[in-house]
Image (tube, rainbow, N blue to C red):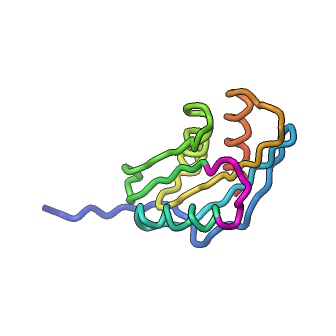
Amino acid sequence: MREQNYAFKTIEQTSDVELYKNKGSKFYAYAFPIQKETDVKKHIEKLKEKHRSAGHFCYAYRLRPSASHYRVSDDGEPNNSAGMPILGQLQAKDLTNTLVVVVRYFGGIKLGVGGLIMAYKTAANKF
């Protein structure tokens, strides 16, 4: 069996935090290069220490050169309103071995599913 050679795009270093605001809610987006699933938990735990009063830590990641392994989390937001829009940004940029986490501080005004989708998509697009 021959080994496959894959070319793929990823990020070289952790991104600076990017802030997006919508109706009082604040969304902080972070992007991390990762090599394995255990990297994901480590990065999220660090963000939870940094953002102790945040309500949601939504994320998406893609692994492997073929980007065949991925996972999303809405972390309590309505189904498919956070993780999938974040994953969509990774797919649009054709990135793999990359984790994007968007941390949300609730601002007191509900955004609705459509508003959440747009907010998470916009925040994840900033890296």
Residue drawn 74% across the image and 63% down it: 17
Q: Name which quarter of the figure residue 83 lies in.
A: top right
- Residue farthest to the right, as pictured: 24
- Residue farthest to the bottom, as pictured: 13
Tag count: 0
Residue drawn 54% across the image and 58% down it: 99
Q: Is residue 30 left or right of residue 22?
A: left
Q: Which residues are magenta?
A: 49-57
Which image quarter is the C terminus in? Answer: bottom right
Q: Name which quarter of the figure residue 53 lies in.
A: bottom right
Q: Is residue 104 magenta?
A: no
| Image location of residue 89, percent across then percent down | 60, 46
Q: Name which quarter of the figure residue 8 lies in.
A: bottom left
Q: Nearer the viewer, residue 25 or 108?
A: 108
> Is 43 drawn above or below residue 53 in the view shown?
below
- Residue farthest to the left, as pictured: 1
Q: Is residue 53 magenta?
A: yes
> Is 43 drawn above or below residue 21 in the view shown?
below
Which image quarter is the N terminus in? Answer: bottom left
Residue drawn 61% across the image and 55% down it: 101
Q: Nearer the viewer, residue 80 or 126?
A: 80
Q: Is residue 116 left or right of residue 97?
A: right
| Image location of residue 123, percent across then percent down | 72, 48
Residue drawn 38% across the image and 51% down it: 69
